[in-house]
């Protein structure tokens, strides 16, 4: 048990709390008492809040790099930060089954950049940062999610805490925002590839089209025809089944 509200939970405490939360969320541990459930929730929220300082510092450093590379006086609208919501942490524990202390994106920053060239420049600059250590890179531009999602994810560490940095092009951000709107309006889960096939196909084709635009080669009739066909199919689904 943690003695102080200011004391960080140990790896073992995080592991056990995560396992209990996962079991309760899936109905596998209905016998666990309410007081324990409350303690587990408080531990997660405290662990989440402990990332705040590292997140703010990472965002500040990322913003400075972005302004320098783009030669801007302000980073407003280009660089954002967020702490993962408690409900999203629980959902991730259930969906991906990680250990609580190993979740990479409790703290997250995002930069929306003009194109692939500036993404590469910011990535290089972050790699040279003396206070932020880039520990792992997931390039979803080269290996996109099955649903079409693309971006560059950097799993970093600042002051001992994990912070995920996402670098997206403007087209990738447009795609992601459209996914969020559809998920919210139609109560789908396109983000995690849970939606009717016409919807998933439309977003895959749109992601491919945007990717071609980012690479400067999206002018083929085949690309345009594929997107038009997917658009017609999803429009039919919206009119008949949504």
Image (tube, helix red, strand yellow):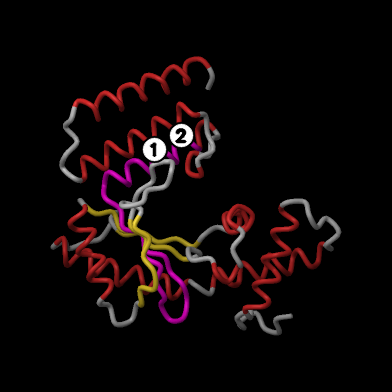
Mark 1 in CB contact with mark 2 (< 8 angstroms): yes
Query: In the rendered image, which residue does mark 2 sit on?
Result: 182
Q: Quadrant of the N terminus?
A: bottom right
Tell me the number on the disc at residue 178: 1
User: In the figure, is residue 121 to the left or right of 229?
Assistant: left
- Mark 2 residue element: helix
- Could you tell whether 86 is left or right of 190 in the image? right
| Figure label count | 2
Q: Measured from the top left, where is residue 126 in percent x and y?
A: 27, 71
User: What x and y, as percent, mark residue 179?
Assistant: 42, 39
Q: Residue at x 43, y 69 (%)?
A: 163
| 60, 141: nearer the viewer | 141
Label for residue 124?
none
- 185 up-or-down from 163: above or below: above
* Crowd rating for badge 2 (residues with CA inside 10 Å; few <14, some 14–19, many 20+): some
Judge the density around disc 1: few (<14), some (14-19), many (≥20) Cα neighbours within 10 Å: few
Residue 78 in magenta? no
Q: Specify the segment rendered in magenta.
A: 154-183
Depth order, front residue of 120/1: 120
> Mark 1 falls on what kind of element?
helix
**Of residues 5 and 105, the one drawn nearer to the viewer in this rendering:** 105
Q: Position of residue 193 (x, y in %)?
A: 50, 40
- Tell whether position 175 is magenta: yes
Q: Residue at x 43, y 63 (%)?
A: 108
Q: Is residue 65 above or below residue 224?
A: below
Q: CA distance from mark 1 to mark 2?
A: 6 Å
- Residue 153 quadrant: bottom left
């Amino acid at each position: 048990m943690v003695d102080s509200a200011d004391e960080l939970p140990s790896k073992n405490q995080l592991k056990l709390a995560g396992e209990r939360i996962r079991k309760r969320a899936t109905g596998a541990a209905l016998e666990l008492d309410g007081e324990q459930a409350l303690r587990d929730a408080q531990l997660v929220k405290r662990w989440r809040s402990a990332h705040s300082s590292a997140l703010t510092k990472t965002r500040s450093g990322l913003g400075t790099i972005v302004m320098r590379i783009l030669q801007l006086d302000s980073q407003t609208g280009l660089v954002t930060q967020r702490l993962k919501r408690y409900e999203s942490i629980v959902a991730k524990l259930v969906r991906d089954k990680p250990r609580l202390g190993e979740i990479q994106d409790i703290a997250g920053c995002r930069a929306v950049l003009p194109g692939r060239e500036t993404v590469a420049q910011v990535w290089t600059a972050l790699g040279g940062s003396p206070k932020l250590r880039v520990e792992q890179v997931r390039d979803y531009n080269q290996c996109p999610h099955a649903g079409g999602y693309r971006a560059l994810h950097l799993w970093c560490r600042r002051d001992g805490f994990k912070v995920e940095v996402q670098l997206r092009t403007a087209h990738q951000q447009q795609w992601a925002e459209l996914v969020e709107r559809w998920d919210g309006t139609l109560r789908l889960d396109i983000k995690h590839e849970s939606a009717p096939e016409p919807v998933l196909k439309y977003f895959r084709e749109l992601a491919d089209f945007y990717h071609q635009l980012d690479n400067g080669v999206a002018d083929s009739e085949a690309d345009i025809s594929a997107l038009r066909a997917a658009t017609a199919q999803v429009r039919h689904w919206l009119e008949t089944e949504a």
